[in-house]
Image (cartoon, rainbow, N blue to C red):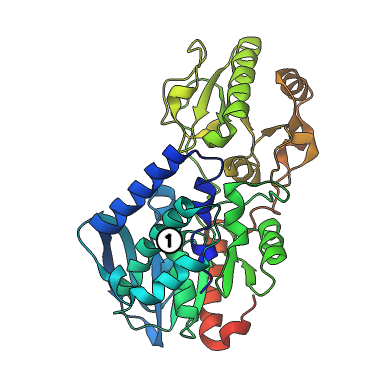
Amino acid sequence: MEVEKIIALHRYALHNKNILYKLALIGHALFLLLFKRYSVKVEEINGSGETKYLFFKALQRFDYDELYSKIVSECKFQKIIVEAKASFGFDFSFLIDFSTKIKIFNKIESRGILDRLYLFTSYLFYNKILKTIDRFDFEILVVFADMQPVDNILVQFYKGRKITTVTLQHGLFVDYEGTYNISSVSYKNVVSDHFLAWGESNKMLIEKHNPDCNVIVCGNPIIKKSYNCVNVRRKFFTIVLDWDVFEKENTEMIGMAMRLADMIRMDFQVRYHPSNDKSKYIINSTFLMQNETLDYMCSEFILGHTSSLIHVAQRLGKKVFKYNTTVPTNPIDKECVVNNESDILCKLSSNFAHSEIKETINIGLIDDASLSCYNLFFCNLKTQGLEVKL
């Protein structure tokens, strides 16, 4: 088992941290290890054939739940659906065969004993999931995101038992080659036999770093062509923020939006990333829309930086502007790239002829067509095994 791929996210958490911060991380990891365990919600569904799938998800977010549910529904075979989360409770299963586990401690590369202790303790916590899942009998494992530690350890463990493994894609991945960034974990630590990608761009990225993985483009089924804009009473535009790693770029986009709103006399909406600390961003409310329930797809146009949402919007034919920085991003039509509000105003004045281009390199099939592709994959995997291709 490649422990490094399990703890990669935690290694990033240690980057450039002082001793006090590392001690706090160790304290939190020990708390999880001693006082938390995995609780699971299990649903078993009978289906056709003798092959039994186990679907596993631990990431909790409403859009992830929708994506996961739709894809799982396309597997018509026997299946066990497991959703896991950490809850309070004692579970000392990490002490079982501890002499073997301590050998892993000695193999973990680190800059010091504090780093190694934190990484090892984190690994022990994720190891608890094995006891929870090992009671199920199945032939094919499908996880939601195998770059996540708990999914990763499951995939590696069951690959060792000759179980076929599959991972889904939960967001667009950006190639950060040459840059130390937590997002690179998403494509560098894939361990599954099969990766079901949204589009060709990420297919090439996964294959570049994981040549032994069978990557198949199945698209994104929760992207729909229809959206309801009946209750929109006045025109507005939307800015889509990235996570707070790009706080500087987020702040610059907000400044652009406020100046542009004043120039064109149009309100704007802010679409925050789920992890954003909103207190970091000061926004003049003069042109800020207060109704956060309006669908961003009803916007006149959308301004973003690296967010997946700008590619989703463009896939559906919306007018999108991508803020130009040195930060790596997914491929996009160069005519959509802007440096400031003046560039946006110029493109709006020229009617922005490229706005109707529906890019498919980042996101291929959508809606029902995508669902059919997942259905075909599960059928082919049953009959063709590891050589499945679409």
Residue 218 visible in the shown view: no
Count up the numbered dots.
1
Position of 359 relative to 352 (above/below): below
Residue located farthest toward the left when viewing the structure as drawn: 89
Residue 29 drawn at (x, y percent): 35, 52
Residue 146 drawn at (x, y percent): 50, 64
Residue 181 drawn at (x, y percent): 61, 46
For the residue pair 51 and 181, the one nearer the viewer reads as 181
Position of the C terminus by quadrant: bottom right
| SS assignment at label 1 | helix
Residue located farthest toward the front when viewing the structure as drawn: 113
For the residue pair 33 and 362, the one nearer the viewer reads as 33
Residue 349 drawn at (x, y percent): 76, 20
Report which residue position mark 1 lands on: 120
For the residue pair 185 and 283, the one nearer the viewer reads as 185
Position of 113 relative to 218 (above/below): above
Q: Residue at x 69, y 51 (%)?
A: 175
| Left or right of residue 305, residue 333 in this image | right
Q: Residue at x 47, y 26 (%)?
A: 232
Q: Residue at x 69, y 43 (%)?
A: 329
Position of 369 relative to 297 (above/below): below
Amino acid bearing label 1: Phe
Residue 191 visible in the shown view: yes
Circle 1 residues within 10 Å: few <14, some 14–19, many ≥20: many
Q: Residue at x 63, y 83 (%)?
A: 387
